Image: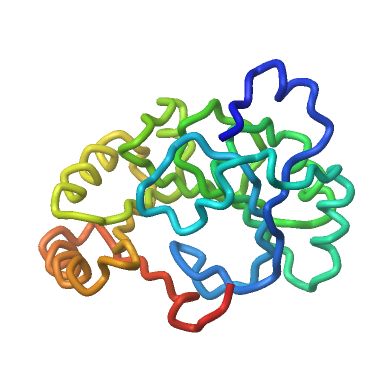
Amino acid sequence: MMKMTEESIAIQTGLPIMEAFYTLQGEGYHSGKAAYFIRLGGCDVGCVWCDVKESWDASLHPVQQLDEIVNAALEFPGRLAVITGGEPLMYNLDELTLALKNKGFQTNIETSGAHPFSGHWDWVCFSPKKFKKPEPEIYEKADELKVIIFNKSDFAFAEKYAALVNPDCVLLLQPEWDKQSQMLPLIIDYVKANPKWKVSLQTHKFMEIP
């Protein structure tokens, strides 16, 4: 995995793009909306159940200039851009998000919060992971707390972060895809008993779309 230092972030003129594609947002608060996904290469969080481990090594993915990234997004009619990874906050995203917003895009991010916050966002999906602690500044920024439920102990983990985010943050529990048959019934019961939470499903996998 490529380790990004503050110096390398400061001098970078582009971003490593693992993939970029137009589809529907499949999970979370904005599920069902047309969205252009920009998946950045590079992650040092290391979730054992990650379904895009090929994104972890940033050096495997071509660096694109910001105008290339934005122009590719403009080829499609949707104006929701979702920046994901990998872990997108490994990079300073101020310039990319400004460029997207200047072209009329709504900017959303999906992040573990494990790196310093940057970027100009319309929506911040904070998905904390046990493998690397988030930076505390993410708590007040989060519009959506999405916790992946892999085992029963993750409910307590979810409540830990629900107590830290701002009061208006949407609270979501999402079963890890391979554990869905075991975890979804538990999530349903948990949400019924704790109605501040909602269920998030990976609907794109049911629809068999990217």
Name the foreground residue: 30 vs 65: 65
Choose top left, top right, bottom left or bottom right for residue 167.
top left
Choose top left, top right, bottom left or bottom right for residue 42.
top right
Residue 84 coordinates in the image, percent (x, y): 58, 50
Vertical position of residue 181 compared to residue 101: above or below: below
At a point 37% along the width and 53% down the height, the residue shown is 146
Residue 198 coordinates in the image, percent (x, y): 29, 63
Q: Residue furthest top?
A: 7
Give the quadrant of the N terminus: top right
Count of marks placed on residues:
0
At a point 52% along the width and 29% down the height, the residue shown is 115
Residue 109 coordinates in the image, percent (x, y): 57, 48
The image's colour scheme reads rainbow
Residue 181 coordinates in the image, percent (x, y): 22, 74
Vertical position of residue 112 compared to residue 146: above or below: above
At a point 72% along the width and 49% down the height, the residue shown is 17
Name the foreground residue: 180 vs 197: 180
Name the foreground residue: 176 vs 156: 176
Choose top left, top right, bottom left or bottom right for residue 175.
bottom left
At a point 77% along the width and 49% down the height, the residue shown is 101
Q: Is residue 36 left or right of residue 111?
A: right
Give the quadrant of the C terminus: bottom right
Q: Residue furthest bottom?
A: 207
Q: Is residue 26 left or right of residue 8?
A: left
Vertical position of residue 3 compared to residue 14: above or below: above
